Structures are given as C-alpha cells and as structure tokens.
Amino acid sequence: MFQANLQKLVGSFERGWKIPAAKLLGVSRPTLDRYLRLAAEGALEKIPRPIREMVGTDITESSDEAAAVTKSEVGSTEFDMVNLFAAGLSRLQEDIDHQGHIQSPYPEPLSRAFNLAAAFNIEHRTSYPTDLASLIRVAARPVFEWCSGYGGDEQGEAFIASRMIEDGEITPDCISMAGLSETDAEQAFYQTLMSVCTELGDELGQRLYSEWRRAVIENPVAESHAIFIAKYDVLRSNTTITKRLVDFFYERVPEIHAVNGKLALCPLTGTRLKKHGDQWATEMRDPAVAQHLRTYGPKWVEHTPATIELKRPVRVFWALPGWHELRLHDAVQALGCASLLWPDFDSVDLLVSQPSGRRFAVDVKDHISPISLSRTSGPDNRRRRHKRVIVIPDYLEDRLPQYKTLFHRARLSSLKEPEQIMTTAEFLNLLGEPA
C-alpha cells in the first residue's frame, strides 16, 4: 500500500519513479529505499508519521506504539537530532578505525537521525541532511550554520559553534555531543578508573590514578600489556587491576593500519599517524607538533598482533590534552617550583607552589572554542590557599588573538564568575617574576 500510494502521488509506475518520489518526500534515495523496505516488512510504525500521512498510509497504533512514535520522532527536537547525528558519526568512525571502511547497515542512531531530519523537513520546511553525503558536508560546518535550533537547549549552547568533522575525522566535540544521546564515553572511562581506585583506598588509589593517567599519555600506542608492568611501579604491584584497565582503555591495532609491518607514530605525542594524501598527519592540533613531524618524519615501530592503542575517546580527552599537562608540569619544575599532577583524583590538573609561598590551582584546557570553554569550566574546585588559573596552549591565542577576550565576554553573558585565563608562556613568565 505504501509503495502503491506513493507511485500514484508521483503519477508514475515506470522505471525511475523513485527519483521524483524521493524529491516529493524531501528525502534521499537510500532513505526512500529504507522506507520501502520497512513498509514491505510490515513495519510502518518505524517510518516517520509525517511521511506516512503524506503518502496516505498512516496506521492505527496501540497506545504504547503511538507514545513511542511521538517520543522518538514527532516529539523530538533539533537538539535530539543533532546529538543522534553525532552518535551515528562516532559509530561510523569506529568502523573506519577498526575495519578501514563503513559497515552496512548504518548504525541505529544515524538511521533515527535521518528519520527525524526527514520529519522536520516536512513539518517545518527545513533542509536537514537525510543521507550520509549531505550529513558529512554540513558536519564540517559549525552547528549554528545549519541547525540554529540546536542552541535552544541549555546543553546545546556549549556546542552551537562546534564542528562534528574536521580533517576527515570526528572531533572531540562530536564525541561529547554523542554522549548527550548515549552513554558519555569520557565519563565511562573515568568511572571505570575511579572504581578500581576506590578498591585500593584513598592513598594507594590516588597513586594508581596518577600513574595510570601518566601511562596513557606516555603510551597511546603500546607493544603489548607488558609495557605497563615494566615501566610503572604501582601498576606492576597490582597486575590484576592493570590488566582490567588495559583491556577497557585499549584495543588491538588492526593490521590494515600497518605499512610494511610497521606503524607510523607521531614523534612527540606517540599517537598513531594518519595518511592524508601523501602527507602524514597527527591528531594533535598544535602547529608546533605538526611542524616537528614535517621536520623529523614519523617514528616507526613494529606492528604485531599484540600491539594495542588507546580507544579514541581516551586519546581525545586524556592523552592529547594530557601531553600539554605533562609539558607544563615539567616546565614548572624546571623553574624550581613544586608541581603535583591530578591531586584528589583530578580535582585540578596541577597544584603549583613557588618557593615564595605563592600557590596556584591550574587547569590546562585545549578547547578550540573560547565560547565552549567558558560554558564548560567552572569554580567547582576552589582551594582557599591556591589561586585558580586556566592555562591554554600558546597556539590557541596565536590562532585566535581575541581568545581570552571572547572567553571573558562569554562568561559575563552567562552570568558566571570571572576566571583568570592565560597562555602557557604567560603562566611560566608569571612564575619567573618575583613574588
């Protein structure tokens, strides 16, 4: 009935009728084929209601089915749709990371997002993407350019200027947005680490926490589990826990990523490099890292079946920002100051003490957007004897000279407390000045 009614609407039963039918419904050909398949399987309830009504094949549903459709489609918002797009893109990125290509069928969040987009396009005369090619095009632009309604949600404000794809891969913000529709990936790893630290008690748990944080930063790619036992004292003393953490945080590196049996790593961060055309590219945004790679080339390591790599959310949220944290920690100590990493289970990134007695509670933030940073940072971990400072890598201000000004304005407009923010160079200069 669905197909017959649709063919009547477009006035054609001949070959090629799907092209005007997809145009009439405002969907792509793959989306139309999915609707036709669902109709043939008797699953009309999975086709967006506005599509069914337009075709003239709406159904009488049970109260439970009607409630489900209202909640998942008609009653959803642009905020839900974009987050589902983010979740779907994250799943596709996992396919590419593991198999080198996209799997079929599309992930369930992506199919739901395309259904929502088609429904919005009919109801509100929008032009949201309903196929993968158009999604990839808009995902490389800031969200506000193609879905201004996303910022209507309080959580959406933090990502309204975000891009979901950059340089052909999903962004950290895309992973965070996916966490608004599914389990928050970053939080899942943090909770896993905290659960094993709790088993050990406060003192030993804190030592393991700090050692594990350092271990994942220093070993985004590792030859095997054994490296963690060999290099880190607390991990070596708790082998069962260490194996649990490695199994949860890491995954095998597929052979498809090897070149003549070797892996190309970033010479500074140790993360696996990707080939863009005939050039190697690092996941680190800092131009100094990219310049070092161009000058010295990749670091090559043997690939074996035991080679493991941090899962993408851990690389994005812990390893890459952590590289800046470790560099600042070392620079602070080189100035003769004391520095403690990740105290109280990461209440702040560093506690810095000068010989003069001045103390700083430092959070290192590598947010590309000052607006996003202003909305995600807060005075949650104030310390009476420490001056709170947000430190950003120098390249962020080089890239956007108004970064700190925009940050302060965004804090003010959100009625949040002022925060002191400075670049790495400025903070180190401050430590070098007389108290």
Image (cartoon, rainbow, N blue to C red):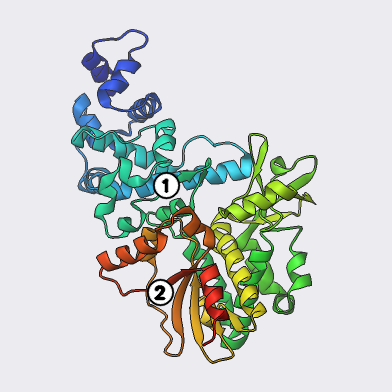
Q: Is residue 227 visible?
A: yes
Quarter of the figure with the N terminus: top left
Which amino acid does the dot numbered 1 rest on?
Arg
Crowding around mark 1 (Cα neighbors within 10 Å: few <14, some 14 to 19, many 20+) is many
Is residue 304 depicted above or below 32 in this figure?
Answer: below
Q: Nearer the viewer, residue 418 or 240?
A: 418
Relative to 23, residue 245 above or below: below
Q: Quadrant of residue 208?
A: bottom right
Instruction: List the single residue furthest toward the top.
Output: 14
CA separation, marks 1 and 2? 27 Å
- Tag 1 residue: 163
Residue lying at 31% horizontally and 22% vertically, measured from the top left: 22
What kind of residue is marked 2? Answer: Gln
Position of residue 41 in the picture relative to residue 241 (left or right): left
Residue under the point 39% across and 58% down: 402
Q: Nearer the viewer, mark 1 or mark 2?
A: 2
Give the residue at mark 2.
Answer: 420
Local crowd at mark 2 within 10 Å, few (<14), some, or many (≥20)? few
Disc nearer the start of the sequence (1/2): 1
